[in-house]
Amino acid sequence: MGKTKHEGPMKLPKWPDPRLWASWVPFGLGKVKQKHIRDTAKVAWENKDNWPYATRILTQGVCDGCALGVSGLRDQTLVGTHICTTRLNVLRLNTMSAIKDEVLFQDIVHLRTLSSSQLRQLGRIPYPLSRKPGERKFRRISWDEALDRIAAKIKRVKPKQLTFFLTARGITNESYYVAGKVSRFLGTNNIDNVSRICHSPSKTALKRSIGVGASTCNYQDWIGTDVLVFWGSVVANNQPVSTKYMYAAKRKGTKIIVINPYHEPSMDKYWIPSIPESALFGTKMADDVYQVNIGGDIAFMNGVMKHWFEMEKKESGSAIDREFVREHTNGFEKLKRHVEQQDWKSLEKSSGLSRARMLEFARLLAGSKSGVFVWSMGLTQHRFGTDNISQVANLALLRGFLGRKHCGVMPIRGHSGVQGSGEMGADPFVLPGGDFDSANKKRLEKLWGFTIPDWQGDIIGVSLENAMLPKGHERKLKVLYTSGGNFLETMPNPDFVQECLENVDLRVHQDIILNTSALLDAREEVIVLPAMTRYEQPGGGTSTSTERMVYFSPEIKGPRVGEARSEWEIYVDLAKRVKPESAELIDFRDVQEVREEIAKANVNYDGIQHLKNKGDVFQWGGAWLCEDGVCPTKDGKGQLLPIVIPELRKPEGHFYVTTRRGKQFNSMIYEGVDPVNNADRYDVLIHREDARELRILEGERVVVYNKFGVFHGRAKFENTKRGNIQVYWPEGNVLIPKGIYEQYAGIPEYNTAVIVEKADTFHAKKDTKYVERRIEELETEIS
């Protein structure tokens, strides 16, 4: 781990720079862009009934939106006030009152007609609820009745038939830790978290390449680096405060490069509301955009390295940091042989970019003395996601962009608590403080005082599928305990997911609001438990940001909802009821005691026990992991890995499709129109020339289909990579195949191949033979 400490927030330049202005039209009037003032006014109106409490949350609490780590209105990157619409949009979840009884106890048939957005607006869950098959309404039950029923069922099933899952809607490190400990206390390793469907390949790849599973650098390293590369990441939409860091980077002369199949408007130009000149005239962000094919990143990176090796033949050291590679890496010659064997025709076809364009990027990186690589789900949500990230690590290692100022690799997180989820052990492959290996297991058993099961736990996707196993199977899912999460709207193939959820004996939904998954039947019973938010948790709570900052968020004075309880306390209470004879092994008197144990369970978190007041924060690992190129691996070196280009099969006239995010936070949708491009949720983003060849007009109804599902929408002409289209998530999940998981990290595949047709043509010829014949023509697997 690094020796250098973070230097604290830095100041922005005082004077404007018109060279960076996006437009001379004040406030971007008449342009398609985010409407920050309107959105802020809307949020203020929504929270008018609880505005004093809302204000205290914003000024005292740690943001429960993305994982930038804004504490109050400040952060550790830049001096000044920081707030964004992502945080404002989720604010109402914390301030709204309880669902009224006359609404909560309506007929379930009526509740099922409501979307998740409409259910969210009903209010907070006030007390424990139960509903059994055949019952038309929820029934209020006591906490004792609810937990006793859950405990009784857990006692009757085998440990492998029990699964826990935690999402990231403001959940604290303390709750993740206790949930991970409780699951092992109850004998199951089936515990997973929301990072499984976003950044699990990042952790897996970085661990095998450089020995760490987190960002090696800070947001401040963006500011002044020679080149800042965003790979499959639209931070302007998902982490809006980061646009201030991009602005600061531009003022320092940093080149910003975006690599994405869609030329994202918000990564080109952005109006940053808290910077006066940018609020008025906008800011030019991206210096260049490389539009790769969906799934073409590995070929693109191999092409870049192939150019480097060719440059090195002419002049040693002209492209590769030879000293860094010699002193701090293994596998160079093997990687070199692998890349040199690749032919340019295959690289160009797979990546969708020309040899000349790859050379441009290769020369840019070769001429840069520093660089930061940032990525998100555009790289991870593939069945070869781990290989995608190891390729990024290859580039960083070959250029020596690791372990020093203005350098690093950063899997940028989209949820405030998710970085800490795996580090706390809420993951089937890890335990607090390390991997799920014998040494770490023995260490934790000594600390905890009980035996941890040896068998490998399942990822959440497999656990859900296990609900469909035969009745007597030892891994048939019978009890599913979820803390937040809506699998109906986040997993591929929602019809199959519904079938799985309804085939579980007992489902427990621990949450602050109702969602569509909670309204489904279960074989025996659905129990809903009301949880507190992070701001309501007695004794406060902590969360870990993308850059490994562990922030303390205090308990905030304000109204409390019904009988809601702290999430970690619910887990402890349940565990004590299942195993009362061993209750002392799982009991915590208060949340401070939880933090003290976390400091012992995960040595990186030694310091969390001292966080007690507003603004308290520390960064585990120091400013840079792998400082001076020394990696926490057996020999202290990074591993260069030869990565094979995945086979991308797409018959002529067919398209790759991927999913995108609009005005939403995870699956919670806040607006039906995407503010960055004015697209509707059911618009299909397609290149104008692709549409012309299909004789499709803009706004015309189209059908996108494959053997997995059918999506009805309208064509919207956008600057997508030709042969690639985009649909919105989760609406487009009907096209995504079920049961396809990445080999190493278990993330579901969220990309596939499809047919696009005029709706009139599709419906006019919608006989079974026609559809079957067209589907047979389509090779639907990307790899």
Image (cartoon, helix red, strand yellow):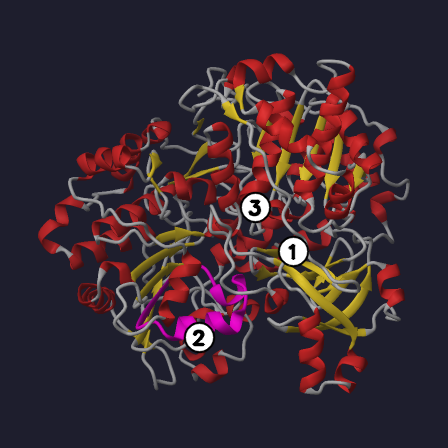
Distance (Cα) linking label 1 and label 3: 19 Å
Answer left or right for 387 relative to 562: right
Is 507 a magenta residue? Answer: yes
Residue where numbered disc 2 is placed: 499
First in residue order: circle 1 vs circle 2: 2
Distance between the Cα atoms at labels 2 and 3? Answer: 27 Å
Assign the N terminus to one quadrant of the image. top left
Circle 3 residue: 385
Residue in the image at 63% along x and 23% along y: 398
The magenta stretch spans which residues? 484-509
Residue 505 is covered by the magenta coloring: yes
Q: Nearer the viewer, residue 716 or 52?
A: 716
Give above or below for 556 relative to 43.
Answer: above
Q: CA distance from mark 1 to mark 2?
A: 26 Å
Q: Secondary structure at mark 1?
A: loop
Which residue is at a point 47% across and 64% down the rendered structure image?
A: 487
SS for callout 3: helix
Tell me which amino acid carries mark 1: Arg
